[in-house]
Image (cartoon, rainbow, N blue to C red):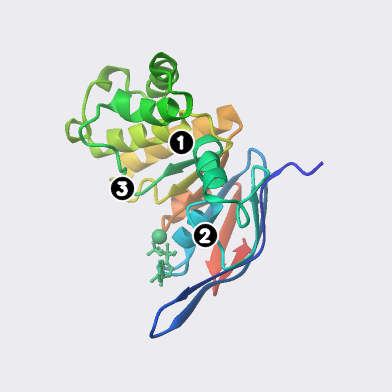
Amino acid sequence: MNDDVIVCRAIRKIFKSEAEILEILRGVDLALPRGSCASITGPSGCGKSTLLSILGGLDRPSSGEVVVGGIDLARSGEDALSAFRARIAGFVFQFHYLLKDFTALENVMLPAFMLSGDRKAAEDKARPILEAVGLSDRLSHVPAKLSGGERQRVAIARALVNDPELVLADEPTGNLDRASARSVEDLLFDIVASRGTTLVVVTHDTDLAARASRRFLLREGTLVES
Ligand SMILES: Nc1ncnc2c1ncn2[C@@H]1O[C@H](COP(=O)(O)OP(=O)(O)OP(=O)(O)O)[C@@H](O)[C@H]1O
Ligand SMILES: [Mg+2]
């Protein structure tokens, strides 16, 4: 049996507008076993976020095969894709996208509540994860009353609350100072390692990229492992 969480074959992504046709991904192949940790680097505009969106079921390839957690994302309908996003994939973005009127605890509870409809169960899942990211004493803070690093830790807790098989992180620490970035990264790597979660991190930061056990460069629309 194949234990790869991610299998991509010959992914192409073309953006068409009236003026031009942009072929951003030109045959991306990728196979990642469960529990692996991969980084993707490459120049701005080369298609890293596009690829991550395809791996997370937020966008579809123009052609090619993408199977993540056993789900054929290129051929799934919208319902299957949203179930996939809720259960299998967790996202961490450069900007946290926390809900501003919700507390740290509520922000982390929300994806769990959406899945189960059970407020108490959602809270029971959210609290230990917030504790794991060191925010037990910030549960009732809204995002405006958290530091940048704390917001990013809430975002990590939110990505992990449904215990996804796969975490996709796009410049997760790109807007933090170096020391906060390193501490948020330590947390992210430690938690995914302890849970056996697969991590794919997109970054310009060579130190962050180097921490991954599998390192890829996206160049001219294809992935090259270094
Ligand atoms: N929806 C879209 N329609 C048309 N073009 C798009 C669309 N999304 C992305 N692009 C183009 O595709 C290219 C790749 O974008 P993408 O966001 O994947 O780059 P990136 O590698 O993540 O860059 P950065 O490092 O700056 O975040 C860019 O040139 C962008 O203009
Ligand atoms: Mg990007």
Q: Would you name the residue on which mark 3 appears?
A: 95
Quadrant in which residue 1 is drawn: top right
Q: CA distance from mark 2 to mark 3?
A: 18 Å
Is ligand 1 closer than 8 angstroms to the Cβ of mark 2?
Answer: yes
Q: Check the image and report above or below for 136 versus 223.
A: above
Q: Would you name the residue on which mark 2 appears?
A: 51
Asked whether residue 37 is in view, the answer is yes
Q: CA distance from mark 3 to mark 1?
A: 16 Å
- Quarter of the C terminus within the rendering: bottom right
Describe residue 83's horizontal placement relative to residue 170 as left or right. right
Q: Position of residue 152 (x, y in %)?
A: 33, 38
Residue that sits furthest to the right in the current view: 1
Q: Position of residue 66 (x, y in %)?
A: 64, 56
Check disc 3 and give the amino acid type: Phe
Earlier along the polypeptide chain: callout 3 or callout 1? 3
Describe residue 106's horizontal placement relative to residue 91 as left or right. left
Q: Secondary structure at mark 1?
A: helix
Is ligand 2 closer than 8 angstroms to the Cβ of mark 1?
Answer: no
The residue depicted at 42 percent of the width and 84 percent of the height is 20
Q: CA distance from mark 1 to mark 2?
A: 21 Å
Check disc 2 and give the amino acid type: Leu
Q: Would you name the residue on which mark 1 appears?
A: 188
